[in-house]
Image: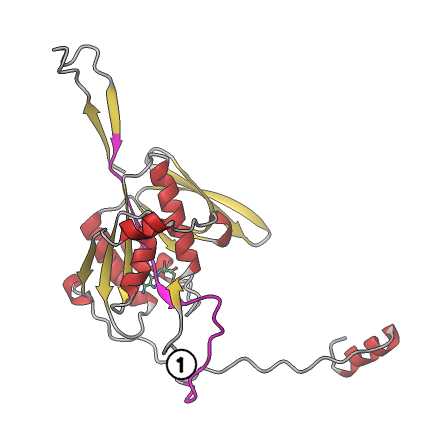
């Protein structure tokens, strides 16, 4: 985090230094990677050839955990702890809509790294590393996982590549002077870690409740800048490292039966091998 102390001299009174109070200007940027995914309300359908999930004519939205990350970054900015919130998405042209959602929530500007086809966590992390090099944010707040691939890898990979500390599954973020306390949701409780900044944080569900963008802010977001880049601009090769062999629907649930006594229930459960 860079703290710039500015002198607010009273030029009108000719008193340039004497009683001039200090004004603190915090120049920390927060980078928030946001992924365009199938809307969480949509029931995903597997393509008939089993090669993946059907995306044609399907409603797409910002990954829900990324909405939480944007909200957290905005709250830090509103608390005067950050100066600028930048949203970045790696994806097709339409991912600009996802960026506009972030801008309508209140982010200042967007970066679209144009890439058609699958974006694997390793590739995304490599691109984000270069975006970080260009923007020098004090914090990168990602979602803990993208709900389409459920990988839960990008934040961890990015932190490792940058050599930064990471606070994953964050349910509370407390920004201090040059460090950040992150409360993490772990099995059976909560753990709080202190990270030196700059740092990587990944947002869990209970971190906050994201705001809805108001109509005036949606209109305002149309004028906010989105910088278009390509992976090649960052020198990143997007060749896939993984091959999807097969995607299958989960097995259909069988219809239930109605039993008329506890004995019949126990017998049915034994019959199914449940008890
Ligand atoms: P994953 O590791 O794929 O589960 O994704 C974890 C987080 O990484 C997401 O919540 C996003 O914050 C970020 N992320 C993953 N893929 C992308 C992408 N294509 N563009 C921007 N951010 C991404």
Relative placement, left or right, of 254 versus 111 is right
Q: Nearer the viewer, residue 200 or 92?
A: 92
In magenta, the rendered stretch is 25-50
Which x, y percent locates residue 242? 34, 77
Above or below: residue 193 compared with residue 36 = above
Q: Quadrant of residue 3?
A: top left
Residue appearing at x 37%, y 76% in the figure: 57
Number of numbered callouts drawn: 1
Q: In which quarter of the image is residue 131?
A: bottom left
Displayed-image quarter of ligand 1: bottom left
**SS under mark 1:** loop
For ligand 1, tell me if the residue under mark 1 lies within 8 Å: no
The N terminus sits in image quarter: top left
Visible in this render: residue 259? Answer: yes
Residue drawn at the location 22% of the way across and 52% of the way down: 223
Q: Looking at the image, can residue 140 be seen?
A: no
Left or right: residue 256 compared with residue 206: right
Sort mark 1 into few (<14), some (14-19) or many (20+) by Cα contacts within 10 Å: some
The magenta stretch spans residue 45? yes
Question: x and y percent of residue 19 in the render?
Answer: 21, 11
Q: Which residue is drawn at 16% across and 13% down?
A: 17
Residue with the mark numbered 1? 52
Tell me if 94 is positioned left or right of 76 in this view.
Answer: left
- Could you say which is closer to the camera, residue 80 or residue 223? 223
């Amino acid at each position: 985090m860079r703290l710039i102390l500015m002198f607010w001299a009273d030029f009108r009174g000719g008193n340039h230094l004497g009683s001039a109070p200090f004004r603190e200007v915090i120049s920390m940027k927060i980078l928030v990677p946001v992924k365009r995914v199938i809307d969480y309300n949509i029931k995903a359908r597997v393509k008939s050839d089993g090669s993946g999930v059907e995306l044609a004519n399907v409603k797409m939205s910002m990954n829900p955990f990324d909405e939480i990350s944007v909200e957290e970054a905005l709250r830090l900015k509103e608390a005067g702890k950050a100066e600028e919130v930048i949203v970045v998405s790696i994806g097709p042209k339409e991912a600009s809509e996802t960026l506009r959602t972030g801008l309508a929530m209140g982010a200042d500007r967007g970066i679209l790294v144009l890439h058609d086809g699958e974006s694997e966590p390793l590739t995304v992390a490599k691109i984000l590393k270069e975006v970080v090099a260009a923007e020098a944010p004090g914090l990168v707040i990602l979602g803990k996982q993208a709900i389409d691939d459920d990988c839960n890898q990008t934040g961890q990979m990015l932190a490792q590549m940058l050599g930064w500390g990471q606070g994953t599954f964050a349910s509370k973020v407390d920004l201090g002077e040059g460090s950040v306390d992150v409360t993490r949701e772990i099995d059976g409780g909560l753990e709080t870690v202190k990270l030196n900044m700059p740092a990587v944080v990944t947002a869990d569900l209970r971190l906050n409740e994201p705001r809805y963008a108001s109509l005036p802010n949606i209109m305002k977001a149309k004028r906010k800048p989105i910088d278009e880049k390509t992976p090649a601009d960052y020198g990143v090769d997007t060749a896939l490292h993984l091959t999807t062999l097969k995607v299958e629907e989960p097995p259909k649930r069988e219809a239930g039966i109605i039993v008329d006594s506890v004995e019949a229930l126990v017998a049915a459960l034994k019959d199914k091998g449940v008890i």
